[in-house]
Image (cartoon, rainbow, N blue to C red):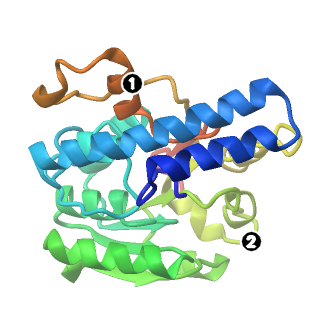
Amino acid sequence: MDRQGRGVTYEELLDTMEAINRKPGSMDQKIKTWTALLASFRQRQLMAHLVATGGWRVQGGPFRGMRLDDTYLVPPHLLGGYEASLHPAMEAAVARGYGQIVNIGCSFGYYAIGLARRCPRARVAAHDIDAAALESCRRLAGLNGVADRLSFGGEVTHGDFATWPAGDTLIICDIEGGERDLLDPAAAPALLGFDLVVEIHQDPEEGTRALIESRFAATHDVRFVGNDRVQAEIPAAFWGADSLDQAILAWECRGSATPWLVLTRRDGEP
């Protein structure tokens, strides 16, 4: 079963819950797992109703109007409240008007395509090591009329950073922990010429946040963005829904906190 319960019947859901019950483990952990399964199943039902009433266009937030399809989605993508804590950073990026945007770990293209629509001057490089996700990004770029300004690629290496213009490039990086190795100015000095928005997949023992901050502290203003802002504009069709369904609509299916660092070059820095 995928995280949204796609194609899963009630009987399969109950069988999965029973299988979890038979496994070793604490009751607290089992209840947590059951809750996630049930919420995912219910969320898929709500998603179908959301699409039926509002279509496949993003309904709010910085990417309002962007066309999506049934790929990798959770309801907050369509509602426009996905990763709401980053909305100010996205609006700042639009106001800045970068000529080059690089989305490393682009998945199906929520940020790559959303920013391409909002930033008509920008060329956007969309990169992901998941070929299926990259193909989804390519397809949605066409649906949104921005394919002519997007390029597509796989893994980004240290040498790739030298190919993008200093002072006019925004890097958006979400690579499931790989930021620790990739975003190293000692190995890729060109990084110091960019603004960056980086999702931190932190292990307290590794100190990823502190390490990334230290690498850019001398040249960039560093801002930590937590997950404390939830913004899901509930459409009129759901105003009468109970509070649990509304909470499930806003759920991003995350197992743990995924904060971000926003790193902005200081004027006059290389």
Closer to the camera in the image, 62 or 36: 36
Q: What crowding class fits label 2: few (fewer than 14 Cα within 10 Å), some (14-19), or many (20 or more)? A: few
Q: Looking at the rendering, in which quadrant would you find the N terminus?
A: bottom right
Task: Give above or below for 226 relative to 217.
Answer: above
Q: Residue at x 54, y 47 (%)?
A: 13
Q: Residue at x 44, y 43 (%)?
A: 41
Taking 52 as reference, is 122 left or right? right
2 or 1: tag closer to the N-terminus: 2
Mark 2: which amino acid? Ala
Taking 1 as reference, is 85 left or right? left
Q: Cα distance, mark 2 to mark 1?
A: 43 Å
Mark 1: which amino acid? Ala
Q: What crowding class fits label 1: few (fewer than 14 Cα within 10 Å), some (14-19), or many (20 or more)? A: few
Q: Position of residue 164 (x, y in %)?
A: 45, 75
Q: Position of residue 127 (x, y in %)?
A: 48, 75
Q: Residue at x 86, y 35 (%)?
A: 25
Q: Which residue position holds label 1?
A: 247
Q: Secondary structure at mark 1?
A: helix
Q: Which residue position holds label 2?
A: 187
Question: Which picture quadrant has residue 229?
Answer: top left
Closer to the camera in the image, 185 or 36: 36
Q: Secondary structure at mark 2?
A: loop
Task: Give above or below for 192 relative to 74.
Answer: below
